[in-house]
Image: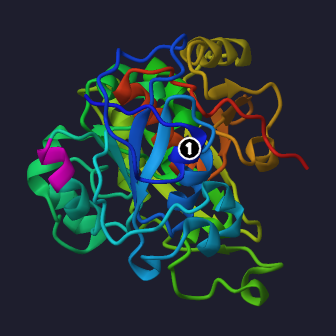
């Protein structure tokens, strides 16, 4: 793979010539990979640009946005003025080492396909490659898959479950924000076989989860002081959660997931409360030990002693999980919280990028949360 060494000034411009350079390591901060973002104008795309600014081994060299092509990134989005004269383009027209696509679902696959075919790794932040078959995609998305021939190459991009497979991948399906929180809340218990297959996920999301380009009733006066459930038991994240939990046990009964998402009046955050029947005789201390062992080597999932708040992960790439035993009713109640634009989207994409490129998994992401 080629890479390019850029100065901070050059990082704001797609200019720069590729040079041969050694494999990246923490001791060699000059090794820099060229990153392209497809659709920098959405929340996930612009969040990826923000996080890449201080990445020690990667620089943004191209960013597309059809509606804003020709404008400077910092003029279109003043919080990204650090990029200077960096210009948004209609297409990625310079050499890149890795691509992130933040296009809407069913548009992203077609944009990723040419890069994958050229051997350039792609991290798809949309839902195009999360479900394993074109039939499932059709059932839950309501349209044909744009690139079904690539589905077998895609690896589900949750490093806590698939780190080694992601390292070898050239097409990574970034998880959805709801599934990331829900799967991480349940995975230790499901993998250990201490809960049954009937699972209920009650989840809440901030308004930014709807995206910048989404129409509908997302104005301040309509969402403020209001909570609403939507797509009850019919949301496309439901099969994603079931699919990835089921893979933890392989053959045998598959999880039956009832998923109910809610919109709450905050900008960022996912809060997933998950319920499942607990096997007889499993005590709280055993559950805690299972969770801590499962995530012992996970830099971005932490087991919390107390139920976490969404603000505890605001602006960073952490997922906090907490599992409680309802002994009276024989239930496990597991909570997962994360920032839907970071661990739920752009931060997770950068984490996956780091693994694909063979650099430190935490590079550019070791940030505390913003509080209050």
> Is residue 115 inside the magenta stretch?
yes
Residue pushed farthest right? 372
Q: Position of residue 147 (x, y in %)?
A: 14, 59
- The local crowd at label 1, few if under 14, some if 14 to 19, many if 20 or more residues have their Cα within 10 Å, is many
Could you tell whether 200 is left or right of 247 in the image?
right
Could you tell whether 89 is left or right of 46 in the image?
left
Q: Position of residue 98 (x, y in %)?
A: 33, 41
Residue 371 position (above or below residue 288): below
Give the image quarter of residue 355.
top left
Q: Residue at x 56, y 39 (%)?
A: 276
Give the image quarter of residue 108.
bottom left
Toward the viewer: 16 or 183? 16
Q: Residue at x 39, y 69 (%)?
A: 89
> Is residue 162 inside the magenta stretch?
no
Q: Main secondary structure of the magenta part?
A: helix
* The N terminus, quarter of image: top left
Q: Position of residue 126 (x, y in %)?
A: 38, 58
Q: Residue at x 61, y 28 (%)?
A: 300
Q: Does residue 251 appear in the picture of this structure?
A: yes
Identify the residue position indicated by label 1 in the image.
52
Question: In the image, which residues are magenta?
Answer: 114-118
Toward the viewer: 283 or 91? 91
Give the image quarter of residue 224.
bottom right
């Amino acid at each position: 793979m080629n890479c390019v060494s850029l100065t901070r000034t050059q990082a704001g411009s797609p200019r720069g010539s590729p040079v041969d350079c050694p494999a990246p390591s923490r001791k060699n901060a000059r090794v820099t990979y060229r990153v392209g973002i497809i659709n920098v104008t959405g929340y996930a795309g612009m969040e990826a640009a923000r996080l890449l600014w201080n990445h020690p081994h990667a620089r943004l060299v191209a960013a597309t946005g059809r509606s804003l092509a020709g404008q400077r990134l910092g003029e279109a989005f003043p919080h990204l003025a650090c990029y200077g004269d960096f210009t948004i383009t209609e297409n990625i027209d310079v050499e890149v080492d890795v691509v992130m696509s933040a296009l809407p679902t069913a548009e992203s696959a077609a944009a990723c396909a040419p890069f994958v075919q050229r051997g350039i790794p792609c991290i798809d932040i949309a839902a195009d490659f999360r479900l394993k078959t074109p039939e499932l995609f059709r059932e839950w998305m309501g349209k044909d898959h744009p690139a079904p021939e690539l589905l077998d190459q895609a690896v589900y991009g949750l490093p806590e479950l698939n780190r080694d497979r992601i390292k070898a991948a050239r097409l990574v399906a970034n998880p959805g924000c709801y599934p990331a929180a829900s799967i991480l809340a349940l995975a230790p218990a499901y993998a250990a076989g201490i809960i049954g297959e009937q699972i209920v996920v009650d989840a809440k999301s901030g308004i930014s989860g709807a995206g910048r380009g989404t129409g509908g009733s997302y104005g301040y006066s309509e969402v403020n002081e209001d909570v609403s459930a939507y797509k009850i038991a019919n949301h496309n994240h439901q099969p994603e959660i079931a699919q990835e939990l089921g893979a933890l046990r392989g053959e045998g009964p598959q999880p039956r997931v009832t998923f109910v998402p809610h919109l709450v009046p905050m900008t960022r955050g996912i809060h997933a409360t998950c319920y499942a029947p607990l096997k007889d005789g499993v005590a709280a201390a055993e559950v805690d030990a299972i969770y801590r062992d499962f995530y012992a080597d996970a830099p971005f999932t932490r087991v919390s002693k107390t139920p976490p708040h969404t603000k505890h992960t605001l602006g960073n790439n952490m997922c906090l999980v907490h599992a409680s035993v309802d002994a009276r009713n024989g239930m496990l109640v597991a909570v997962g919280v994360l920032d839907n634009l970071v661990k739920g989207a752009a931060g997770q994409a950068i984490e996956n990028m780091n693994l694909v490129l063979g650099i430190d998994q935490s590079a550019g992401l070791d940030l505390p949360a913003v509080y209050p």
